[in-house]
Structures are given as C-alpha cells and as structure tokens.
Amino acid sequence: PNPAACHLGVPQMVYHSRHNGGNAQCVCGCPLVPLKSSRYKGPAPSAASMGLDDEFMDLVDEAIRSFRWNILFKNFEVLGDADRVLVYLTLWIQKCLSVASQASGVDEATRSLEVLAASDLPGPGDSGFILNSFFKPGTPQDCQIAKACLKQLRQETAHRFLKILYPSGQLNKWWSQFSKKRFMNLTL
C-alpha cells in the first residue's frame, strides 16, 4: 500500500454508504432511500412504509456515525448515488457544528438550525450549489425533487444531531472539536 495513505501500516479509507447499489429511485444522483422517521415532509419514504424495522440504519444514521472519521479526509471517491448524499450530509453536519459553536446554548442552536434546515438552500442544478460536480444533471422537475429530498434530510439530520450534540443541555466537547474542520475543503 501507499505509505502516504497508511498510518501505522493500516490503510486509511473513508466510510462509504451501505445504500450504494440499492434499487431506490434516483433523481439527479440523489437516491430516495427510506428514512427512519416521517417527521418531515419530503419525497423520501419512511422505513415503516417499506416494512423495515427499528434496527434499520438510514443515510442520516450513516452520516452521523461516519462524520468524525470522514471529516478527516480531503478526498472522497463517490462509489454510488448514496455516497453523494453522504458527502452532502457530512457537509451539513459540519455546518450544524459551526452554527452550534457560535450559539449561546441549546435553545439558540436549535432555533438557528431548524430555520436553516427548513430554508431553501441551493441544490442540484442551482448555480450556487457547491456539489454540482458530484450530482447529476436533471430536468427542472427532477432538480426540485432532489432539493426537496436534501431539505428533508437536512431537517431530519439536524433533529437527530442536536440530541447528540447537546446530550445534557451542554455542548458535547467530543463533537464540538470538529467545528472548524473542513471536509474536502468545502462548506455549505
């Protein structure tokens, strides 16, 4: 193996989504995979509607679980459509950390992130979307569906991540230490 890519003889590899290669419908390279919760309106189906149990790990779980590992990498090879969303959610979690680190407490962080997650941020097909090179072009209707999916994922991720970031009402220092890190030198 390449010595530059190893640490103590162990190859360093990013975490790739287990949802790659699935049979989910894709719009603009964004798979409409099930989410554990149908808390937020959007095109992604709920896990319950697909007959999946509570042990099901969705893309939001994967993004949160792999964040502290993947954030350390400057490159990420996309192996499938779910990896595109994993990259987006990693950048979104990075944004959540940045916003939370500047907030005065859990209430302000929650308000700020809920507003930001629900806003219409640039998505596939928009000129201001920093990941246009990762996502695939599509019709205007496909781009709207992909943006709605990313919005739904942002809202669900913010909701779950806030519980981890503020487990007892105080900012978790093991997560907040990543607030200044940049994944692939990009920010949302």
Image (spheres, rainbow, N blue to C red):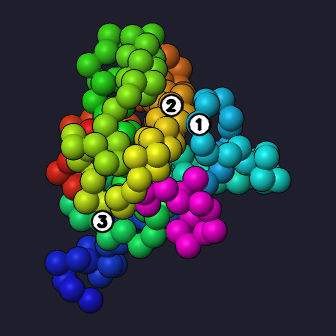
Separation of disc 2 and disc 3 at Cα?
A: 24 Å
Q: CA distance from mark 2 to mark 1?
A: 10 Å
Nearer mark to the viewer, of 2 and 1:
1
Question: What type of secondary structure mainly makes up the magenta span?
Answer: loop
Which residue in the rendered view is the most extreme toward the right?
51
- State which tag comes first along the sequence, 2 or 3: 3
Residue highlighted by disc 2: 155
Residue under the image location 35 percent in, 58 percent down = 137
Amino acid at dot 1: Gly
The image shows residue 95 at horizontal and vertical percentages of: 31, 34
Q: Nearer the viewer, mark 3 or mark 1?
A: 1
Q: Are marks 2 and 3 in contact (CB under 8 Å)?
A: no
Q: Please give the residue where the numbered disc 1 appears in the rendered image.
A: 42
Q: Which SS class for mark 2?
A: helix
Which of the two residues, 60 or 107, is positioned nearer the viewer here? 60
Find out whether residue 26 is within the magenta segment.
yes
Residue 154 against residue 136 in the figure, above or below = above
